[in-house]
Amino acid sequence: GLEAQLSVERYMKCGFGVCGQCALDGLLVCLDGPVLTMDQLEGVADFGRFHRTTTGRRLPLGTR
């Protein structure tokens, strides 16, 4: 596979992994990232399909 590192943007309320706001299928962007490898993101179902609003609501990409 292709080796890549991606910068993942998520809203982070605490920045310490306590609140779960930045959770991405078991990964915590505030602790595990924000730069993640392609290997880490390969099995993440939400990656490239969903985003979260400022309130934490999960929406498909392209919706507000």
Image (cartoon, rainbow, N blue to C red):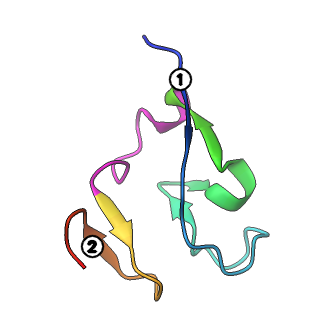
Q: Are marks 2 and 1 in contact (CB under 8 Å)?
A: no
**Vertical relation: 41 (above or below) 11:** above
Circle 1 — which element? loop
Left or right placement of residue 55 versus residue 62 in this view: right
Circle 2 — which element? strand
The verdict on residue 46 being magenta is yes
**Vertical relation: 27 (above or below) 30:** above
Magenta stretch, main secondary structure, is: loop
Give the extent of the magenta segment. 39-49
The verdict on residue 41 being magenta is yes
* Residue 1 image point, x, y percent: 42, 10
Left or right placement of residue 41 versus residue 11 in this view: left
Which residue is depicted at the point 36% across and 66% down? Answer: 51
* Residue 13 image point, x, y percent: 67, 81
* Residue 46 image point, x, y percent: 35, 54
User: What count of labels does the image hold?
Assistant: 2
Label disc, if present, on residue 4 of the rendered structure: 1
Residue type at the position of mark 2: Leu
Pick the residue in front: 50 or 27.
50
- Quarter of the figure with residue 56: bottom left
Pick the residue in front: 51 or 46.
51
* Residue 60 image point, x, y percent: 22, 66
Which residue is depicted at the point 49% across and 57% down? Answer: 24
Left or right placement of residue 63 versus residue 31 in this view: left
Residue type at the position of mark 1: Ala
Label disc, if present, on residue 59 of the rendered structure: 2
User: If you read the primary sequence from the N terminus, does the residue marked by circle 2 or circle 1 appear first?
Assistant: 1
Please rate how many residues cluster around mark 2, counting C-alpha atoms within 10 Å: few if below 14, some from 14 to 19, many from 20.
Answer: few
Which residue is depicted at the point 63% across and 58% down? Answer: 28
Please rate how many residues cluster around mark 1, counting C-alpha atoms within 10 Å: few if below 14, some from 14 to 19, many from 20.
Answer: few
